[in-house]
Amino acid sequence: MEPRLDYYTASPEALKGLLLLEAQSFELSIEKPLLELVKIRVSQLNHCAFCCDMHAVQARQNGEDERRLYALCVWRDSGLFSPREKAALAWSEAVTRLPEGAVPDSLFQAVRGEFSERELVDLTVAVAAINCWNRLAVAFGQQPSP
């Protein structure tokens, strides 16, 4: 697919708020390696090749193990992820898939066992941000560099 347009130059004003949110995400209480895993998984669900590629590259640069990146699509069945990581991934998937149904109380209770209130809000904001980036990239055909 050829890129449809460059949304950065088409409307810098619209991107300004999203860029501020992204900058703020560097100050969130969630550890950076976990945030990268969440961004990759959400991008997989949203079929965003650009963001999957970008965050996988970033994760590897930050020392993430390749095996864990390969197993991310089957994280529920993999022993490579901690209970905290699995809780974050389950929460991220549920928040991403809101059109399919509400986030179950049982999931909320499970994730609260791994995350403080602040961390859970921060995680949810990070999920909302990557969902927004995914929607822009997918809608306008942004592709990873070969």
Image (spheres, grey):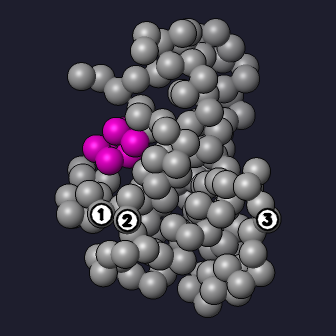
Q: Is residue 63 visible?
A: no
Residue 145 among those drawn in magenta: no
SS of the residue under disc 1: helix
Residue found at x 62% / y 33%: 135
Query: For the C terminus, which image quadrant?
Result: top left
**Residue 107, located in which quarter of the rendered image?**
bottom right
Question: Which residue is labeled 1 in the image?
Answer: 71
Relative placement, left or right, of 121 versus 131 is: right
Q: Position of residue 35 (x, y in %)?
A: 47, 60
Residue found at x 55% / y 28%: 138
Q: Along the polypeptide, which appears first: circle 3 or circle 1?
A: 1
Q: Amino acid at mark 1?
A: Ala
Query: For the N terminus, which image quadrant?
Result: top left
Q: Residues within 10 Å of mark 3 (few under 14, many from 20)?
A: few
**How far is disc 3 from disc 1 in space, using C-alphas?**
26 Å
- The magenta-colored residue range is 52-58
Q: Is residue 43 visible?
A: yes
Relative placement, left or right, of 69 versus 13 is: left
Question: Which residue is labeled 2 in the image?
Answer: 74
Q: Position of residue 130 (x, y in %)?
A: 57, 45
SS of the residue under disc 2: helix
Q: Amino acid at mark 3?
A: Ala
- What label sits on residue 102 in the rendered view? 3
**How far is disc 3 from disc 2 in space, using C-alphas?**
22 Å
**Residue 55, located in which quarter of the rendered image?**
top left
Residue found at x 65% / y 39%: 132
Q: Position of residue 144 (x, y in %)?
A: 35, 27
- Foreground: 6 or 80? 80
**Marks 1 and 2 in Cβ contact (< 8 Å):** yes
Q: Amino acid at mark 2?
A: Val
Q: Residue furthest bottom?
A: 113
**How far is disc 1 from disc 2 in space, using C-alphas?**
5 Å
